[in-house]
């Protein structure tokens, strides 16, 4: 597999297209609108696509949030509805089947708190269906949720926690929400990716055993991700590339200098990144200043999108009243 | 069992003593000091004690926090050390055995967030022992932790979540932390109770099946509780009792009025409580204004107490450096 | 003046009516609706009204929030618009005149943070009108704002801070927002009071010199208040009254006991309140558990109400875009 | 004046030294220790020094925080004491003179909230000296404080607010606290600068009229600053410089390419920075992930340092008890 380090399928495709001057084989691509929301579907159809994209086979739906989405309740509701429609395309569930929503990430780090915040705004009903079934409409689906925390705080792989809970709760569908890192500031807090190939929480990068997916859990697993930061190391790396690209364009092809620029290697780049970021390398993030407000807005959008998709018998008003 | 509704063994004993003019049978009681911290041990030794106290057999150790504990780092460290000593009396563990710490309660409600906050300040080591064993001293015990959330947010009984995780992690000891309700304002945020009989999270009141204890989990289970609120309904109830007591003292014994006062029944009291608290009955709490700061201070005290007790090979300085 | 201790004119009127079996003289009263929002106007017309109500002459407009207002963006917008309409009835300002909004209260105590939170959601324009006038429509009014903090944190009377700023900024209108205490749980977070008689911040109770009002500042001063807590001492007091009322109803009029109940005096009541609340008397508040979320919702409603009233040339969409 | 854009005198000196291969004229420099804390005094003695450093004449004392300062209460207290000692060198005040502490910055943006957080942890006494003088020792100095907010939220220049309050309160000393931007990650949250030349809040950059200083206010004004972020634009700029420096070192001096590299101009650099950071340029910050915890720790250190310096008659224990 290529080493394209991005959580977003649309970015992986862009990077491929830029580096290879062409679209990746084994990948289908479609753009359309639901209401005012621009949607992009990227489907990786075979192993060639997997190698080209550095991502497993499956469908990745990307919603671009309209401007002002975080400042206007009506636009927010519209995005939730578009998101619900996209989700419904991936979910095949009978009315009575149980869904488990998993809010990944760390409560204590604002841009990583998206998952836990979504959990706290969900319409959770499983316990009511069990304990006081008469209090609740028959058409309401049992939904439960967990925010398991991160490896550094729990000392337990997130996969182990989910697996343990899945064995007790026996859900028919899992939906994971996670904050992602983007390569581009312009996507930060502006993009929602919905995929049916599961997720590898931060700690488990490259660790297939700990992936949270249908493959490992035996239950359909949807992953919803939003890029909420650019890692400072990524930003430094991209800045360096930008400077080198500009230099290379100026240098005479074939000249000694041109070759030298081409030859600047990974080690040299890492050294420069370390020099800029020391002593915090790996622990730094780049965020917009209004991050608290924006994460709250994203949590409302996503929680409502899930609520609408999981409760087709209810409308947003019913859901809001229930949450009261 | 008597219907003494308090989470604290020392309060149950006081209520018994007041109502019955004597100490409960089947209960041992001991007061002493560790450093400047006043400690009370209440041990329920048999079934008569269980009935008298409305609590299961076992040991309940209560620490009274010295004045200014929440405003003075040195006093805080002293309480942590006393707490560690009390804990060590209840824990019998080999060095290499794994401990799971469970922070009960709701992140989003400040006085209920004590458990999750303790989790975020713990020295968590299990993943390091597994993934990078060379990075960590041999004498360090594997510790992991989870903040499972509350039934209203997860839709899953806390017991089910813990049980699922226990089956994966296979710890040798469980320590639960929970925010309790007290009957008396003077105990709020001033008392730490440590018991070896487990805990019934809010939702599971009276529901033995969902208890988190050695009986249900098969693993020694310590419960650490701090009263952080008085329920407004309790406060209203106690106020009514206080007024009635004052009236009764004034009324001539045997008079019609005396009998009437004696006869005021539960229904009448509930009606009055509802009238005062409507429309929020059951959803109101009484807290001191500086509640955010005090919960943070309690979380530090308890996390450090647990850290010291679980890592006998380290001192508080080592632990603080590790947490960096 | 009567000693009616409530910040709300509608409550003062109710208490008068209950105690005196009639409506207070010197007070006009009107109920009506703006959209779905119930409004009550209480106008104190003369000094007899002032004495009867324990409040200065002037108009007090009260909005009752519809159910679900805190859970439904559309209802929230409707309340903002009703509030703007009520405000516009009290404000007489030319387009170009400057408004100063003052958010009273303490950032660090959630139910007291309403004022500062409103300030952070306002459309603030004065500096743009001064520094980059071309960037902003001519029809936009200059608005500035301050959250001065509370006496216990600043050591300066709020009046002094406001007076100092007023002398520099020379506004033509002042709008103060403050969190109030109610006597009744049913009004908590459900009622917005708008008055044209100014405000005495907590610390200044009974201290006319430190009142923030047209009388002391020489500029029209609107006060917007929302009851966000019931003081625990008030709750205990009202509970005691409730019990006594029930007793009195049962006792034979003229009997010795009846007289005794009637004779229970203030000192006895204070003693009982202290006994229930010790050691926190005066520092305890009763709040619903979801207080953080509700205060945020109230801040949005009030900030938007003010934004709409102060910027008649703009609609809510323009305002939201500006705030971006 | 040179265009050295850094808030820190030690950084300005380093940049001068690097660019000019020598120490700046008109600047004195001294390194020493108070306890375990490394201190650097930079004194700008004349106008040549002002031009060389891009800063006004005066003394700038810099404390380097020892490792683990944010994780160890004892180290924290030691830094507070060293800071108090440094402050006392700059402050000449009689016991009875009033101090006004100003916490600059924005409550709603964590790394900018340092000033307001310090204010909320100060020992504020002015109102007690005025209202209940008998409750407080004679040796206690009157201290008051304000967190005025930022221009974007208030619409009022911070200078105007302070000036207005100063005219009412008539303090004999002003201490301002502000979060700064550093050029180097290694200084972020690790350095405290104390200077006697006042401060220009963010908005007022280059605007001498709005400076908060003895020159504009007529009262001695101390500024305490801590770098809590690196602006993302600075980071991108420094990364570009680093790459260019590396290129230049490789290029043959005098060659066409060498000249080209030397000639890369400001506009080109700005274009690249915009490309990396779009659409957030100017609104992005780079912070360590644990920023919430670290800002709290810094606020405690600085508040206690000020408390000790302003209340020479009290020790840290007395101060902590007072704050209870």
Image: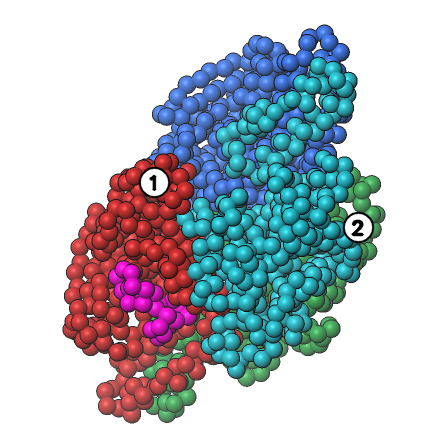
Chain colours: A blue, B green, C red, D cyan
In 3D space, how far apart are the residues under numbered discs 1 and 2 (Cα atoms)? 57 Å
Are discs 1 and 2 located on one and the same chain?
no
Observer-nearest residue: B244 or C287? C287
Q: Seen in the image, is C185 located left or right of residue D48?
A: left
Q: Please tell me the numbered disc located at residue B140.
A: 2
Q: Secondary structure at mark 1?
A: helix
Q: Which residues are magenta?
A: C196-220
Residue shown at 44% from the left, 70% from the top: B235
Crowding at mark 1 (Cα within 10 Å: few <14, some 14-19, many 20+) = some
Q: Chain of mark 2?
A: B
Q: Quadrant of the C terminus of chain C?
A: top left
Residue annotated with mark 1: C319
Residue drawn at x 52%, y 26% is: A195
In magenta segment, residue B289: no
- Which quarter of the figure has residue B236? bottom left
Q: Would you say residue D273 is visible in this rendering?
A: yes
Q: Position of residue D100 (x, y in %)?
A: 53, 64
Are there few (<14), some (14-19), or many (20+) residues within 10 Å of tag 2?
some
Q: Is residue B17 left or right of residue D166?
A: right
Q: Nearer the viewer, residue B155 or A119?
A: A119
Q: Percent from the top left, x then y, of residue B285? A: 45, 63
Residue depicted at x 33% and y 55%: C171
Counting from the top left corner in percent of width and height, residue A184 is at 56, 27
Magenta stretch: dominant secondary structure: loop
């Amino acid at each position: 597999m290529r080493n394209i380090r991005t959580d977003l399928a649309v970015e992986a495709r862009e990077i491929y297209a830029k580096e290879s001057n062409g679209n990746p084989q084994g990948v289908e691509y479609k753009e359309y609108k639901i209401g005012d929301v621009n949607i992009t579907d990227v489907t990786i159809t075979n192993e060639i696509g997997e190698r080209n994209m550095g991502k497993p086979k499956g469908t990745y739906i990307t919603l671009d949030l309209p401007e002002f989405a975080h400042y206007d309740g009506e636009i927010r509701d519209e995005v939730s509805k578009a998101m619900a429609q996209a989700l419904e395309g991936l979910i095949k569930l009978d009315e009575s089947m149980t869904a488990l929503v998993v809010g990944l990430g760390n409560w204590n780090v604002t841009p990583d708190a998206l998952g836990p915040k979504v959990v706290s705004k969900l319409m959770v009903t499983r316990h009511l269906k069990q304990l006081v079934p008469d209090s609740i409409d028959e058409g309401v689906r049992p939904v439960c949720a967990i925010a398991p925390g991160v490896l550094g705080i729990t000392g337990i792989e997130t996969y182990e926690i989910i697996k343990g809970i899945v064995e007790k709760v026996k859900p028919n569908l899992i939906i994971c929400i996670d904050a992602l890192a983007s390569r581009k500031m312009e996507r930060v807090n502006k993009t929602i990716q919905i995929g049916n190939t599961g997720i590898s929480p931060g700690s488990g990068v490259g660790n297939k055993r700990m992936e949270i997916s249908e493959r490992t859990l035996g239950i359909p697993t949807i992953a919803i991700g939003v890029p909420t930061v650019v890692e400072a190391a990524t930003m430094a790396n991209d800045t360096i590339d930008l400077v080198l690209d500009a230099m290379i364009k100026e240098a005479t092809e074939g000249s000694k200098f041109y070759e030298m620029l081409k030859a600047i290697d990974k080690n040299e780049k890492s050294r420069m990144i370390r020099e800029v970021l020391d002593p915090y390398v790996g622990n730094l993030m780049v965020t917009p200043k209004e991050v608290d407000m924006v994460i709250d807005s994203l949590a409302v959008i996503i929680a409502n999108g899930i609520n609408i998709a999981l409760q087709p018998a209810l409308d947003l008003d019913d859901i809001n009243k229930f949450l009261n």
